[in-house]
Amino acid sequence: MPRLTWSQSVAAGAVYRPLDGWQYEYVPMGGIVKYLTDATAVGVVATITSGSDTLQERAPVSAGGTAGVLPSPLDVPLQEDEVAAGDRQKVQYENTTGGAITVNGSIEYIPA
């Protein structure tokens, strides 16, 4: 099961897209993807898309995370989607504040 994790400081007003260039950005076959994401403070919004499905559209990211600590499905909402071959996976964070905020996350791709 391919998995990608990230913990990245996002500067004030900046955008961060952790899946750009990932080997499974375009999934090779059908299956399921699972996303977990949080931030160290309020003020980050995220858009999560999976193929033609928008799982989250520019919505606030759960705050209270710790830099470098991956989120758990016990603490943050799990985003899950069934995917088809060729579906593009995309996460875009936007820091809407005046200071840097760290975002933590992971994606797990489970081929069928």
Image: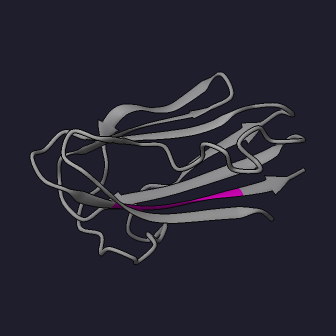
Q: Residue furthest top?
A: 52
- Residue 54 horizontal/vertical position (percent): 53, 27
Residue at 43% in and 57% down: 37
- For the rendered model, the colour scheme is one colour
Q: Viewer-proximal residue, 21 or 57?
A: 21
Horizontal side, residue 62 vs residue 51: left or right: left
Horizontal side, residue 104 vs residue 97: left or right: right
Q: Is residue 107 magenta?
A: yes
- Residue 25 horizontal/vertical position (percent): 71, 42
Horizontal side, residue 58 vs residue 71: left or right: left
Residue at 47% in and 71% down: 72
Region rendered in magenta: 103-108
Q: Find residue 84 and report its image quarter.
A: top right
- Residue 40 horizontal/vertical position (percent): 24, 65
Residue at 69% in and 50% down: 22
Q: Is residue 83 magenta?
A: no
Number of numbered discs on residues: 0
- Residue 8 horizontal/vertical position (percent): 39, 62
Quadrant (top left/top right/bottom left/bottom right) for the N terminus: bottom right
Q: Is residue 109 above or below residue 7?
A: above
Q: Is residue 65 above or below residue 81?
A: below
Instruction: Report the magenta stretch's main SS.
Output: strand
Q: Is residue 59 above or below residue 7?
A: above
Q: Residue furthest left?
A: 98
Q: Viewer-proximal residue, 55 or 44?
A: 44
